[in-house]
Amino acid sequence: MRTRLLDLAQRLPLFLSQDNQTYVACPTAIPVYSEDFFIWLFCLAEKRLGYNASPSEIGRVARTLDAQARGAKTMEPVHTRIAKTGTKSYQLDLGTDDHQVVNITGQHWQQSQHFDVRFERIEDYKNITTPVRTANTLAACMEAQFSIATDTAEKLALWVAEALLPDQHPPILVITGKAREAAVEKLRNLIDPVNEPIIETPTNFTVLPRMALENKVLAFSVNDKFSEKIIKAITELHQGKRLQLKYCNRNRIKLRSTVHRTVIIATEEPQQISPGQFNIEINEAIDFEFGKIVGALLNLLVQIIRQPVVRQTFMTMPEPGERPAMEELPDPDSS
């Protein structure tokens, strides 16, 4: 039976990630040492073979696949949520069961059902709301949704765009005000929606590396000030930290990964986390048609890809009269 289980698993592409972990693709990338792989192979064996495979049997299959992948040395990068597919192109995984993606270039964005890269869907992954084409800018959406000043809304829009792009690392966002938690949830759901957008506040800095591996965005809500050790750990994960963990997940494995995490903190009282942090006060969070906000975000990404100077204005936002003019976006359906 082990041979038949192995035959089932070997029908899928097998490869090593950039962090030297073994994956199968079906078509999303699944680590062979994971609960997702266990569930997938268990269900497949039950359906195809009428057999309930035991954890030890699936564990042996995983170890065999791992050895085969390391022998073949086929390497493919694994991405979460969004990937750079060319010098001026990206692909966004919407997280749907039918594998809908959005291809983004400097000309337009278009939905598709074809993965160009390997996407992994980490724990608690949710769909990004299907984008709706709109003439509104993302800054206008931010201004209307959070009732904030125009210049603050423009800066927040650029922060959101940078938070989504895989090759950009915006400053830590610290939100105060009456609607701070609602704002964190809405921003997290725009960048990387999950079932629980706000992570439980860590009481010990040693749990942060695991949180970083399980979340693309670290979003916290705190009433008290963080300790110096937690601030240091959050800053390291934001700036980029090489993690090396051993843990048991069906099998005992060693995981090495370099992470840069986007960080959002909702706090009752302002607090200093890092020198370049972006502070904003939000006292109102109005419900807005989310599909149009996603569409406006994609429009901004098109502009950023076409005019990189747009992104460069984030850290030193010029006065309104000095900002570069945004080109009109072409209608993708007319090309």
Image: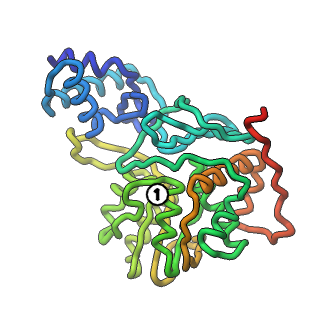
Q: Secondary structure at mark 1?
A: strand
Residue at the (59%, 75%) spot, across then down: 280
In percent of width and height, residue 39 lies at 25, 35
Furthest residue to the bottom?
269
In the image, 83: left or right of 37? Answer: right
Q: Quadrant of residue 9?
A: top left
**Quadrant in which the C terminus is drawn:** top right
Position of the N terminus, as image quadrant, is top left
Say which quarter of the image contains residue 54: top left
The residue singled out by tag 1 in the image is 217
Closer-to-camera residue (285/118): 285
Residue shown at 25% from the left, 23% from the top: 64
- Residue occupying the point 68% across, 37% down: 87
Q: Position of residue 95 (x, y in %)?
A: 46, 42
Q: At which x and y percent is residue 231?
A: 43, 71
Residue at point 74%, 41% (across, down): 106
- Classify 56 as above or below 4: below
Looking at the rendered structure, the kind of residue marked 1 is: Val
- Compared with residue 156, is residue 117 higher up or lower down, i.e. above or below? above
